Image (tube, rainbow, N blue to C red):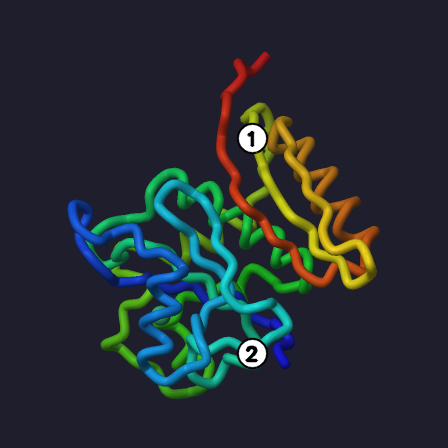
Amino acid sequence: MNKPEYIVLHTAAHGTPSHNYDSTRAQIDAWHKARGWKGIGYHRVVRLNGEIERGRQDKEQGAHTRGLNSRSIGICFSGHGDYYPWTEKQKISGLWLINILMKRFSIPPQNVIGHREAGSIRGVPDPHKTCPGKLIDMDVVRDSVRRERRSDANRKLKLTINLVLDSETSAEYLEMDETEQVIEDLLLDELIKDHPGIAEVDIVKADIVKVEDKQ
Ligand SMILES: [Zn+2]
């Protein structure tokens, strides 16, 4: 059982941009099975092109961060955060995923952490751990999710999500092509809050399709 209070970000830390870099859910699943685990330890994988792959179910305990596995959602970004920053598409999809999960589980921005910060929460800081990568500044990430999106209000976004419900309805598939502000109002404030039965928020991809001229 998992009761998410934190969102913990990770890097796959695998490959180089020219070789084996875009780690997949299937690859990570195989690595973790080789460790004797029951399968992928993360709840989501954010690929280089912004597509989000599903790992464990949100209510299922993860296997990614010592001490926080029964109270966090683990998100792994493909690539290697010590050497290369997230791609622009990873950033857009990743931040939307984090935003939606924060709303879904009422997680405050300060509880969006990098794996390397988890030791401090347990009272045993680990200065050698770099995950989700030396090039991922968690203060910038927290600022980004905290920030009101007014400055990006005219940015058009294509957002694809699956809302997985508890009831007979298994999933509601949505594809929205609107400005970020409209999507934020509709999706986060109305849809999620008005559907307490939602068991999973399975965002598939977020992509900026157009930046409109500001008036
Ligand atoms: Zn990690």
Find numbered disc 1 in the image and state the secondary structure of the residue it sits on: strand
Image spot of residue 163 (x, y percent): 69, 51
In the rendered structure, the answer to whether residue 49 lies left or right of residue 135 reads right
What's the residue type where badge 2 is placed?
Gln
Query: Disc 1 beta carbon < 8 A from ligand 1?
Result: no
Residue depicted at 61% across the width and 53% down the height: 202
Instruction: Choose top left, top right, bottom left or bottom right for residue 170.
Output: bottom right
Residue 55 vertical position relative to residue 99 in the rendered view, above or below: below
Decide: few, some or many residues near mark 1? Use Cα within 10 Å; few <14, some 14-19, many ≥20. many
139 or 189, which is in the foreground?
189
Residue depicted at 27% across the width and 57% down the height: 81
Kindly identify which residue carries mark 1: 157
Displayed-image quarter of ligand 1: bottom left
Image spot of residue 13 (x, y percent): 26, 62
Which of the two labelled residues, at mark 2 and mark 1, occupies the earlier sequence position? 2
Q: Distance between the Cα atoms at labels 2 and 1?
A: 32 Å
Kindly identify which residue carries mark 2: 61
Instruction: Choose top left, top right, bottom left or bottom right for residue 32.
Output: bottom left
What's the residue type where badge 1 is placed?
Leu
Q: Quadrant of the C terminus?
A: top right
Image spot of residue 148 (x, y percent): 60, 41
